[in-house]
Amino acid sequence: MGSQSNKQLSAKDDAIDIVTKPFGTAAVVIIGIIALAFGLFLSVSLGAANIHLHTVWEAVFHFDSQQTSHQIIRELRLPRTVGAALVGAFLAVSGAIMQGMTRNALASPEIMGVTNGSAFAIAIAFAFFPGQSSFTLILWSFLGAALGASIVFGVGTLSKGGLTPVKLALAGTAVGALLSSISSAIAIRFDVAQDMSFWYAGGVAGVNWSNIKIIIPVAAVGLIIAMVLARSITVLSLGDELAKGLGQYTRTVKVLGILVVILLTGAAVSVAGSIGFIGLVIPHVTRFLVGVDYRWIIPCSAILGAILLIYADIAARLVNAPFETPVGAITAIIGVPFFLYLARRERSGI
């Protein structure tokens, strides 16, 4: 039995090595971290009142409560920037896991109904249980994400021919549209449209330290599980039959993967609303740069996702200053053409 297990592990390693593109991975990580660090400082320094990078450094490492600029940085801009980095990382990792598990190039939290499920649950909370705390809204967001994912995967599994990438995409689009429509109807009927407008537009302007303290432990659990599953998702991304032939428990991996997506997407939507296309675009860019080994895809997706949302948030502040453009609109400008390209490529069978 031990010899057979060793052979299966060796076969898994061989399968990963065949399709992995290891060169350039270190460069991606190093350059990504540098770009992320610069983006963090740039995001904190830009706003209604521009603040010099030296002042940002002083406020972070030598805080003086008597200086207004330090107060602005510590209480407003830092949580916003950290929130953007976390949300971008969560959505990117969620998209990478969904694409790996389903072998569907179009899979992402917003396309597979998970994001719309979270928004649907939050609409119910606003309409029927007003005055909820940040922690309770996050719980509602998790429940909604679980509902959206369960319906999509349930519809895909019960359909004739079983769960396929095409059926998942169709089910996700249909369920997402249904949940979004119901959310809009609830918002209008119960006069909570103004509250829900933030969640539909998407943004990190309202993120505070209490939000971050709540989502970090939950998201940390999700990221740890994701890294533990990384090798299994790599094999699973090569096909169910190959994964089963190598002795992998595919059902268990998929259940845990869905749990990770629910945790990360629920946390992201609860504090930033519906921000689309990060989970679609970033995993493809990451695979192009580092190959298909999810031991690298997951951490690199987190870095690149954080970078994308931080710089998108900066652009949202500058494109129509002094007014802010919804950051979801900025990510959509990038994501929609990319989605159309992927849809055309999938249709042509390339």
Image (cartoon, rainbow, N blue to C red):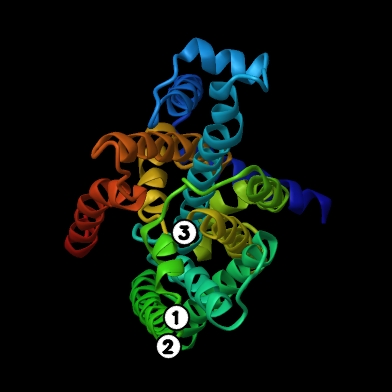
Question: Is residue 6 left or right of 264 when viewed as pictured?
Answer: right
- Which quadrant would the C terminus be assigned to in this image? bottom left
Residue 193: quarter of image: bottom left
Q: Are marks 2 and 1 in contact (CB under 8 Å)?
A: yes
Is tag 3's residue or tag 2's residue first in the polypeptide sequence? 2
Q: Are marks 3 and 2 in contact (CB under 8 Å)?
A: no
In this figure, which residue is indicated by the disc labeled 1?
156
Alpha carbons under labels 3 and 2: distance apart: 31 Å
In this orientation, which residue lies closer to the viewer: 11 or 227? Answer: 227
Rendered location of residue 316, percent (x, y): 32, 41
Alpha carbons under labels 3 and 1: distance apart: 26 Å
The residue type indicated by label 2 comes to: Ser
The residue type indicated by label 1 comes to: Gly
Q: Is residue 68 visible?
A: yes
Q: Is residue 248 visible?
A: no
Name the mark on residue 273.
3
Q: Residue at x 35, y 47 (%)?
A: 327
Q: How many marks?
A: 3
Q: Secondary structure at mark 3?
A: loop
Rendered location of residue 229, percent (x, y): 65, 51
